[in-house]
Amino acid sequence: MPPIIYIPIGIHGYIRCPVEAEPPVTLVKWNKDGRPLRIEKYSGWNLLEDGSIRIEEATEDALGTYTCVPYNALGTMGQSPPARLVLKDPPYFTVLPGWEYRQEAGRELLIPCAAAGDPFPIIAWRKVLSKMGEPAAFPRPERPDPLLVAGGVPWATQVA
């Protein structure tokens, strides 16, 4: 496991037990802060078929140091190295671009856009076209929505 696992606050995340085994892994046991993890005690947490933990909405309950022990038909090779889970702020827009900009051909066009988050997000632009090859029209919300930003392309920008 990586030494640090980053999960965005208030958004779903995963804690994965990185293992390759032959025969395949049949069971993964987890420890949190040196004690057996009882996933059923955490609302919105699920143990997935591959042994990963899915956290529906990351809160301070998720903070801690995790280890996993994978098993297969031959037994186990032991515990993984520890990984500390850290919560981070999901990305969000601090300056939204306008809905439409027009400029004469050959002239410079500046479109303001800024975002924040921890770690600091990267803003990537793309031209959005409809099925007919024309610029697509999307409704623009009145305020930034971090879930939209984290989940995809809300307008012509994407925060990654």
Image (tube, rainbow, N blue to C red):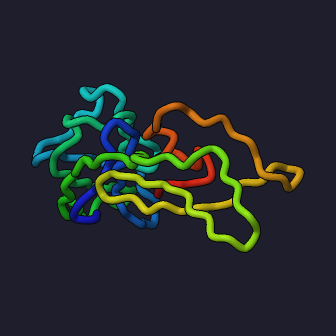
Whole-percent x and y of residue 47? 38, 39
Q: Residue at x 43, y 62 (%)?
A: 122
Image check: 142 left or right of 101?
left
Residue 120 locus on image (x, y percent): 33, 59
* Residue 52 visible to the viewer: no
Q: Quadrant of the N terminus?
A: bottom left
Name the residue at 59% across, 49% down.
153
**Viewed as shown, does residue 68 lie left or right of 143?**
left
Q: Nearer the viewer, residue 89 or 102?
A: 102
Left or right? Give the position of 68 relative to 92: left
Give how far across and how far down residue 19 sits, in percent: 37, 63
Location of residue 142 with respect to 74 vertically, above or below: above
At 20% from the left and 35% from the top, the residue drawn is 61
Image position of 30 (left or right of 154)? left
- Seen from this angle, which residue lies furthest right? 132
The reply to whether residue 146 is in sight is yes
Q: Residue furthest left?
A: 34
Front in this rendered view, residue 54 or 37: 54
Q: Is residue 131 above or below residue 109?
A: above
Q: How many numbered marks are there? A: 0
Residue at 39 percent of width and 34 percent of height: 56
Q: Picture coordinates of residue 134 (x, y %)?
A: 84, 53
Q: Quadrant of residue 105?
A: bottom right
Q: Quadrant of residue 75?
A: bottom left
